[in-house]
Image (cartoon, rainbow, N blue to C red):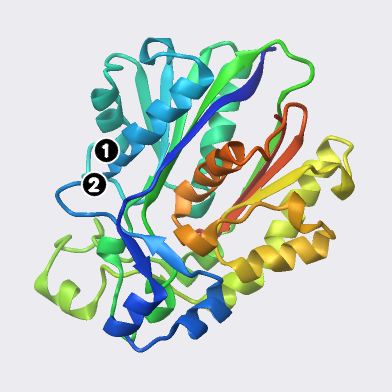
Amino acid sequence: MYKSKITGVGHYVPDRVITNEYLSTIMDTTDAWIVERTGIHERRWFTPGKDTLASMSVNASKMALERAGLSNKDIDFIIFATITPDYFLPGEGVLLQRELGMQGIGALDIRNACSGFIYALSIADQFIKTGMYKNILVVGGEIQSSALDKSDEGRSSAVIFADGAGAVVVSRTDSEKSGILSTHLHADGDHAEELYCSSPSSCQEVRISTEMIQRGDFFLKMNGNAVFKHAVVRFAEVIQEALDANGKTKSDIDLLVPHQANLRISNYIQHKLGLPDEKVFNNIMYFGNTTAGTIPIALSEAFEQGRLKEGDLICLAAFGSGFTWASALLYW
């Protein structure tokens, strides 16, 4: 059986910076209120007519390919994690493929929201382990700002979610000192409606109607208390599961890169695991929650800051809509 490793990382975020002060001019909120509840100071929103999910993902992918020392012709397969594709159909993977000039290879889309990137990474790992593919482009990205309820009623979620894309190249390796050790995937659909968007929906007589728009069915609905309560439990469980599966302990982790859901959640998990600040990477303060994009964006930033060193034990963990949660343990 073959082994896989991340050989290149890249990211792109829109130029448009949305500060807490700006949000306080369009809804009843303040910088202090947002920072206290989320840890976010600013986030990026796309510019209509300039940014698309495909264009952002192209920029992230090109950066990852360059850092991996590969060209577009070296990629055998694309896996794209997003819940906000440019089109209702087809999926985003084929749009990215077209823009990168990779016609002919397979492109798979997955819709696992905040856990999407780790799910995608796990799929790539299995494809490479079986020998089916040698180099896989894995992308996580979102444009969420266009679907946020920016009224006072929707402020609890509108201040959190943002836009951006991250990409990694996953390649076959013979190295004994680097590579993905294991991935762990879970879900519990009993809580699907705690964090969801009900429209457009194929189970209604019409997918889009004036009544749906007036009711705000297209806006994200989130039970923040339920999400926090389950997230802190599942994050800790799935991280420990990864460590146990590989005979490792919390102290063996060189860097934890959690999904950037909420800084309060990340800080809670850091405290529970007893990890010092230098062993946890957070950037939600500046980029907000980009859902499937948070972990690959964070990995790319961590790489740029010199916080990913060869041989380091890296733990990735995520929790989100579904509910779904996942982890991955790997040597850099």
The x and y percentages for residue 83 are 37, 50
* Image: 167 above or below 278: above
Residue at x 58%, y 41% (from the top left corner): 299
The local secondary structure at tag 1 comes to: helix
Q: Residues within 10 Å of mark 1 (few under 14, many from 20)?
A: some
| Residue at x 40% of width, y 13% of height | 71
Secondary structure category for the residue under label 2: loop
Which residue is the site of mark 1? 55
Can residue 161 be seen? no
In terms of image quadrants, where is residue 121?
top right
| Residue ranking furthest to the bottom | 28
Q: Quadrant of the C terminus?
A: top right
- In the picture, residue 26 is in which quadrant? bottom left
Q: x, y percentage for residue 259?
A: 58, 54
- Residue positioned 71% across, 53% down in the render: 280
Q: CA distance from mark 1 to mark 2?
A: 6 Å
Specify whether residue 5 is in view.
yes
Name which residue type carries label 1.
Answer: Ser
Residue at 22% x, 79% y is 215
Residue 37's place in the image compared with 161, above or below, is below
Label at residue 51: 2
- In the current view of this chain or complex, which residue is farthest to the left? 210
